[in-house]
């Protein structure tokens, strides 16, 4: 299977703010197998915890941009799954696959074992998203998302 990555950045705010979405189709869906979370914003004086999540969505929202997925092997064909980052209108959220807290001075890396990837539904408007759920001061979540098709 082919593997790809995108770098996502949320809009600045207190949440919910989506850093990235992987948008599949009825034929191909992204199998999320890697995520790296951090913050682009300098830490503020409150040194706060930030609730983050990987979720499925039922609509893709409005992305500020749609980066071209980067294949891990440069010989691979272009990805079928598309991506959205820096959303101006948030996706419609479904259930959380993972919900976790992250200190604004830290980063978090997650990887799935083969066969244990996170997948969205096989419909054109469903996605897998990485997002900042809630925080008390305006921050920007940064996320690298890796998947296979």
Image: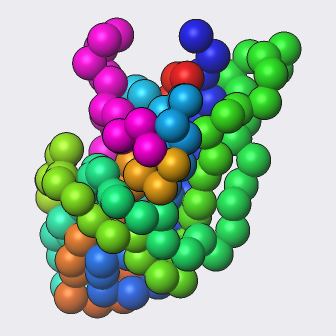
Residue in the image at 54% along x and 41% along y = 25
Residue in the image at 40% along x and 70% along y = 91
Is 138 placed above or below 147 here?
below
Question: Whole-percent x and y of residue 80?
Answer: 67, 34
Q: Which of 48 and 121 is in front in this view?
A: 121
Q: Give the range drawn in magenta.
A: 108-123
Q: In this view, does 64 lie to the left or right of 141?
A: right
Q: Nearer the viewer, residue 14 or 114?
A: 114
Question: Whole-percent x and y of residue 51?
Answer: 18, 66
Q: Which residue is most to the right? A: 75
Q: In this view, does 114 lie to the left or right of 123?
A: left
Question: Whole-percent x and y of residue 108?
Answer: 31, 45
Residue 75 in sight from this viewpoint: yes
Quadrant housing the C terminus: top right
Q: Which of 93 and 144 is in front in this view?
A: 93
Is 95 placed above or below 116 here?
below
């Amino acid at each position: 299977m082919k593997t790809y990555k995108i770098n996502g950045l949320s809009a600045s705010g207190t949440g919910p703010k989506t850093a990235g979405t992987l948008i599949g189709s009825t034929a191909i869906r992204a199998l999320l197998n890697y995520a790296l979370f951090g913050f682009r914003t300098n830490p503020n004086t409150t040194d706060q915890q930030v609730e983050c999540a990987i979720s499925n969505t039922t609509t893709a929202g409005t992305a500020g941009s749609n980066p071209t997925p980067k294949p891990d092997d440069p010989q691979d064909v272009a990805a079928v799954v598309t991506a959205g980052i820096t959303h101006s209108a948030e996706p419609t959220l479904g259930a959380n696959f993972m919900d976790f807290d992250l200190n604004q001075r830290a980063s978090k890396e997650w990887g799935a074992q083969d066969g244990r990837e996170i997948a969205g539904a096989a419909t054109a408007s469903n996605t897998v998203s990485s997002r900042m759920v809630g925080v008390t001061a305006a921050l920007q979540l940064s996320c690298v998302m890796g998947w296979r098709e």
